[in-house]
Amino acid sequence: MRSTRAGAGKTVAIGGVDGAGQFYGVQTLRQLFGGSTSAPTIASVSVSDFPSMPLRGTIEGFYGPPWSHQARLDHLDFLGQVKANTYVYTPKADPYLRDKWRTPYPADKLSDLKSLVSEATDNHVHFTYAVSPGLSICYSSTSDRNALEAKFQSMYDLGVRSFSIPLDDISYTKWNCAADQTTYGAPGRESAAKAQVSLLNDIQRNWIDKHAGAQPLQMVPTEYGDLTDTAYKQTMRATLDPDVVVMWTGTDVVPPSVTNAQADAVSKLFGRKVFLWDNYPVNDFGNTRGRLLLAPYDKREAGLSNHLTGIVANPMNEAYASDVAVFGTADFSWNDKAYDATTDWKQAMSYLAGGDPTATAALQVFGDLEHMAPTFGATPWQPQAPALAERVKAFWTALDGGHPADAIAALRTYAVQIQDAPVTIRGGAVSAGFVNDADPWLTATGLWGQAMVAQLDALSARLDGDVSKANTLTAQSKSLQKQAAAVMVPEGRNNWGSVPVKVGDGVLDTFLTAAGDLVDHPVTVQVPAKALLATDGTTKVPVEVTNRVAGDATGVKVTVSAPSGVTVTPATVDIGSLAAGQTAKETVTLGATGSTPTAREVSLTTKVDWTGSGGVESATTTDDLQSSCALTPTRPVAATADSEESGAEQDPVTNAIDGDPATFWHTDWSVAPVPSTPHWIATDLGASRSVCGVRYLPRQDGNPNGRIGKYEVYTSTDGKSWGDPVASGTFANTASEKWIPFSEKAARYVKLVAVTEVSGNPWTSAAEVSVDAR
């Protein structure tokens, strides 16, 4: 595309290698217009551009309520504007694609599909029709193949020229008909691949190749999300027609990243470049409950165009809100080497806002609060509210640095932006479809923003000594927080039904809780989570007293108390005066009865008294302190166990001492009979040490299987004689680290016995087992 001005003449010329190229040139021209609507302008410019990947767009492949017909039409227009050329029609809710795939569409459905195909054609988008027959097809059946071809023919007659046969989310351990066992053998990876290849090659060679203009057949393999070479992939690689396009989702259903090395590896496994089905921003699975996924398209490595035939994004049930991520997908697949996620995200927000800078800024504030991108595991691949988190971090840094007024003022400015963002977004500049999709989240965001402003104003009042006003504003903030938390996603919008919306969770709500606590505890006392147990049985505990938002405080005094059996010396410490932001550090000593040093968890209660502008005040807190013979646990050099899984998975006992909480040891579960509890893991420290505790971290993947219930701990100097247990009890049924303290023992070996599993299951698991030792 070129725009020039020569003398009095003005010329805009657009050329393309085909109609699609000329269409994309027009889209580029549209982006270059400046000036006002009534008097648009364009600079003299020359643009030569082309896509890095041949296939770019979306796949409507999510579970739950499908898009409306109008939403699909609008989405096809959107794809054209962002130079995407592929829309795969495979909604799980269309019965004629899955359960009723043999049944022809009724006339009204055909009419809707025809209008979609026409809209796609107008926008130079390939409308790909994808039938998923795997739940019921008899691969060896001529009548079933004829039915599949008839369904494709009905779409071809509507103008469809791109077809797909997804064979994902089905089992290859059973056949749908006895004839397939006779034809392909017993169910399994290799026989499933043989059956699928037979069908796919037949359709490609005897139907696709004989229909003018038809694009190469696409398919989704049953093994679509890994890099393991199996008999299934080997058969596909060796026998699948080279023209058939194979789709892949990355290294998992929702991969945290996609790299060139991964794409190269999977291309070798299937014997061709693959077509990435990217499950972002889809929100139809459990970890997305209550979420809009508005983070940018990210963590896909530049250079993937060398390894992929293209990318399609699987969007949300909310069609228009999906435009944020799909905008990035289109941009990345057009030019992956120049793609920048941060820049693209801002451009996507500007697109939704029609270029309005105020609305664009509001969308960025709102989008940050919906930034969480979950995986199927416990760790998201994009964090929640990074912009807010950075501002909250700066708030605490300024507050702890003695600048509370500055900290409050800076964060309040952003809180007002959160409060006002929904009003701006609903003001008319932003796409109406997006506003409708985001409506409950916008409502909750406004309430959370009001709650944040009120809570920061409460801190200002506390700093000024107006305790009554501070308490009133805190109560107001808590009421608004409660209202925000009660906003629900309407029934029928998503696969997960009516649930509370999530806005900035883990960042915004956490800050408000901490800020509310500051009003009640403007002068704080901190003790560490751990303190070193000395060989004489005493423990020195550092105590920090900080005036955070109490103005100038005088007569500051701290009293520390402990449960019966533990002494505190001195019990009371006089601090004197503390200016706002000032910290004083003191030390108290804990003592205990008994001649043997014993590790223990001590509940310390600290009461601080002071006089401020509001008069005499006090605040009390209780903290649990671990008094241990080691502040850093020791990772054993070796471990053995009574059982470990080595069949269906590789979960060896060494996973429990590798320092990686993402791996875990699991007892054998894939053989029959499954060995039952009690199970044990014995650790070797490599030399005799003075030990006083064991730390057990349950598996961290969100699955509670194998979590220890009742337990016993034993020590040994030789790994043979264990004696009586040094500790026993029952763990809470949570995924957090568990600490088992006991009296110091000389030992090289420490054994943790799982007497029971929390749900009564026969197995045991552990992410990490370590020992407190000096």
Image: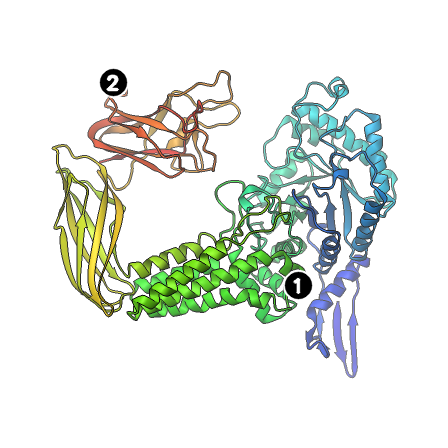
Task: Classify 672 as above or below 134.
Answer: above
Mark 1 vs mark 2, CA separation in Å: 73 Å
Q: Which three-letter amino acid code belongs to the residue tagged 2?
A: Ser
Q: Residue 721 got which mark? A: 2
Give the position of the C terminus as an image quadrant.
Answer: top left
Q: Which three-letter amino acid code belongs to the residue tagged 1?
A: Ser
**Residue bearing mark 1:** 431
Residue nearer the viewer, 763 or 709 = 709
Mark 2 element type: loop
The part of the image, by quadrant, that contains residue 366 is bottom right
Residue nearer the viewer, 552 or 249 = 552
| Residue 73 place in picture, x, y as percent | 75, 55
Please give the name of the residue rendered at 86% of the width and 41% of the height, measured from the top-left corner: 154
Task: Classify 561 as above or below 518.
Answer: above
Give the position of the N terminus as an image quadrant.
Answer: bottom right
| Residue 369 place in picture, x, y as percent | 51, 57
Q: Relative to residue 160, is residue 492 drawn left or right? A: left
